Amino acid sequence: MKTVKISLNSIDKVKSFVNDITKFDNDFDLVSGRYVIDAKSIMGIFSLDLSKPIDLNIHAEDGAEDVMKVLQPYLV
């Protein structure tokens, strides 16, 4: 598992983020405080405080390089 900090501070960023990661079969969790939600759930993301960076847990054994390339625009 790999953890990175991402910023999703606009509605357009959230939509493009969900579209980008749903292309992967891996599991992704967003962690904000004590809340852990499925990063592929757009409704779940909007339930978080998006004004500050969020931890993204990437559950990938292989192919993490491809995921990191797609995540570049969102990394803090």
Image (spheres, helix red, strand yellow):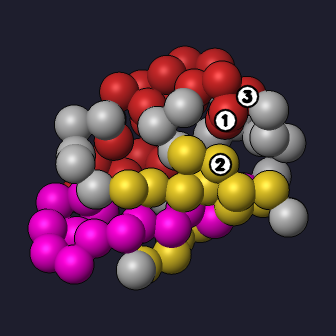
Q: Which residue is mark 1?
A: 45
Q: Residue at x 66, y 23 (%)?
A: 43
- Mark whose residue sits in front, 2 or 3: 2
Q: In this orientation, which residue lies closer to the viewer: 12 or 24?
A: 24
Q: Secondary structure at mark 1?
A: helix
Few, some or many residues within 10 Å of mark 3 (<14, 14–19, 20+)? few
- Mark whose residue sits in front, 1 or 2: 2
The magenta segment is 53-68
Q: Residue at x 43, y 32 (%)?
A: 18
Q: Is residue 62 left or right of residue 7?
A: left
Q: Quadrant of the C terminus?
A: bottom right
Locate residue 60: give its quadrant. Answer: bottom left
Locate residue 31: give its quadrant. Answer: bottom right
- Evaluate whether residue 54 shows in this view: no
What percent of the width, then of the height, locates residue 47?
Answer: 80, 32
Report the amino acid beneath label 3. Answer: Phe
Dots 3, 1 in contact, CB < 8 A: yes
What percent of the width, then of the height, locates residue 64?
Answer: 22, 70
Report if residue 43 lies within the magenta region: no
Q: Which residue is mark 3?
A: 46
Q: Which residue is mark 2?
A: 37
Q: In this orientation, which residue lies closer to the viewer: 39 or 10?
A: 39
Q: Is residue 72 left or right of residue 49?
A: left
- Distance from label 2 to label 3 (Cα)? 10 Å
Q: Secondary structure at mark 3?
A: helix
Report the amino acid beneath label 2. Answer: Ile
Q: Quadrant of the N terminus?
A: bottom left
Residue 14, compared with residue 39, is above or below; it is above
Report the amino acid beneath label 1. Answer: Ile
What percent of the width, then of the height, locates residue 46?
Answer: 73, 28
